[in-house]
Structures are given as C-alpha cells and as structure tokens.
Image: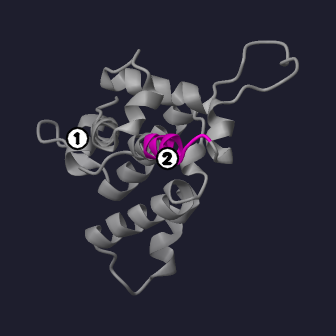
C-alpha cells in the first residue's frame, strides 16, 4: 500500500494532485479493495485484524494529510490520531465493516427458517471439534458489536426481526468512537 501512495505522484509527473483528489483516491481504494468485496459482511474479524485495519487507514491518512509544522517550536511533526479524526470525518474501516456485518445479520435472520443461509447461521456442527480454544465465530462478532452499543445480552435474533430497531442499532455501530 505504501508503494501505491509513494508512486502516485510519479505516475502523474505533469499533474498536480489536489487534496480532494487524494481523498477521493483513498476512498475508492478502500471501498474497492476492502469494504465492497462480497465477503466483507461475512468476515469474522479478530481484534488483531481490526487493529491492523485501523493502522493501515491511519497510515494512508497520514500520507495524505502530510506532516504539519508545530506552531510553538516550528518543527515538522506527524499528525496525532485525534487531529486525523478531526480532519477526516468519515467513519473508519472497522465501523463500516461492523455495520455491514450487522446489516447482513439482520437480513439473514429475516429470511426465514427454510433458507439455507439461516440454517447455517443458527445450526450446530456435528462431530468433534478440534483441540484448543474455539475460533471466533461470525455470531460472536455480532454479539460483541451489540455489547459495544450497549445491547449486550439481548436476544439479537429476535431483535433483528424488527427492522426499524435493528437499523437503529446498525447506525449506532457506525457512529462508535473506537481509539
């Protein structure tokens, strides 16, 4: 990714890339590669993967917004996360993935019990499971997202049947402030 940002100006030597064009390129890159993939709503992200996505986004934003000169000392410095959040007001990658995951969960629950997708969601695997701690499941991510909003121990399948209440929760996940 750093190679793409560094070579962007060398690809267009005669053109001056404006700030808005760079923001547009960032949005298109993130949407095309990460968010708009058909599987992003079914990802089961671990905390480590969420952190890596946030670090990637901050790295790209720091490259776009460039270092600033400190008013007191006059030295160049990198922007802090709070300053980046103030300059770039769109939701971060993790929020978008979480809201799309919750939106898809609501759609699956409202599909009905006869659909295969619903049976896969609520079904149990037969046989013995592998040794060690179980991997985080997609349903576990939905429960964790609901806990972040404050609806942690509610029965989410029944809650998702009411489309308006569920959409309110999806919007609340999108507006979370995670450091």
Label 1 Cα neighbours within 10 Å, binned few <14 / some 14-19 / many ≥20: few
Instruction: Confirm whether residue 71 shows in the render.
Output: yes
Query: Which residue is painted at 40% across and 87% down in the image?
Result: 14
x%, y% of residue 150? 31, 20
Instruction: Residue 70: name its quadrant.
Output: top left
Residue 35, image x, y percentages = 50, 54
Q: Residue 160: which disc?
A: none
Q: Disc 1 and disc 2: Cα gap in Å?
A: 32 Å
Disc 2 crowd rating (10 Å Cα; few below 14, some 14-19, many 20+) is some
Q: Residue furthest left?
A: 72
In the image, residue 104 lies in the stretch drawn in magenta: yes
Decide: is 135 above or below 86.
above
The segment highlighted magenta reads 101-113
* Residue 86 vs residue 127, the one in the foreground: 127
Between discs 1 and 2, the one toward the N terminus = 1
Q: Which residue is mark 1?
A: 83
Instruction: Determine the image quadrant of residue 161.
Output: top left
Q: On the image, numbered disc 2 is attached to which residue?
A: 104
Q: Residue at x 41, y 62 (%)?
A: 26
Q: Nearer the viewer, residue 178 or 155?
A: 155
Q: Position of residue 46 (x, y in %)?
A: 58, 29
Q: Secondary structure at mark 1?
A: helix
Residue 93 is one of the magenta-drawn residues: no
| Horizontal relation, residue 150 to residue 157: left or right | left
Left or right side of 106 for 41: right
Instruction: Answer with left or right where residue 109 lies relative to residue 152.
Output: right
* Residue 167, above or below 150: below
Q: Are marks 1 and 2 in contact (CB under 8 Å)?
A: no
The residue tagged with tag 2: helix, strand or loop?
Answer: helix
């Amino acid at each position: 990714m750093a190679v793409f940002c560094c070579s962007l100006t060398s690809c267009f030597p005669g053109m001056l890339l404006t700030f808005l064009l760079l923001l547009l390129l960032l949005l298109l890159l993130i949407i095309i590669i990460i968010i708009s993939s058909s599987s992003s709503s079914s990802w089961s992200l671990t905390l480590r993967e969420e952190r890596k996505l946030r670090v990637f986004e901050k790295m790209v934003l720091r490259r776009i917004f460039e270092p600033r000169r400190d008013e007191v000392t006059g030295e160049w410095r990198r922007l802090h996360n709070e300053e980046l959040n103030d300059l770039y007001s769109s939701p971060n990658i993790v929020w978008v993935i979480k809201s799309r995951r919750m939106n898809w969960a609501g759609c699956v629950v409202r599909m009905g019990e006869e659909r295969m997708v619903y049976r896969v969601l609520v079904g149990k695997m037969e046989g013995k499971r592998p040794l060690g701690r179980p991997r985080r499941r997609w349903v576990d991510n939905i429960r964790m997202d609901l806990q972040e909003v404050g609806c942690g121990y509610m029965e989410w399948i029944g809650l998702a049947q009411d489309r308006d209440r569920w959409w309110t929760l999806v919007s609340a996940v999108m507006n979370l402030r995670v450091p």
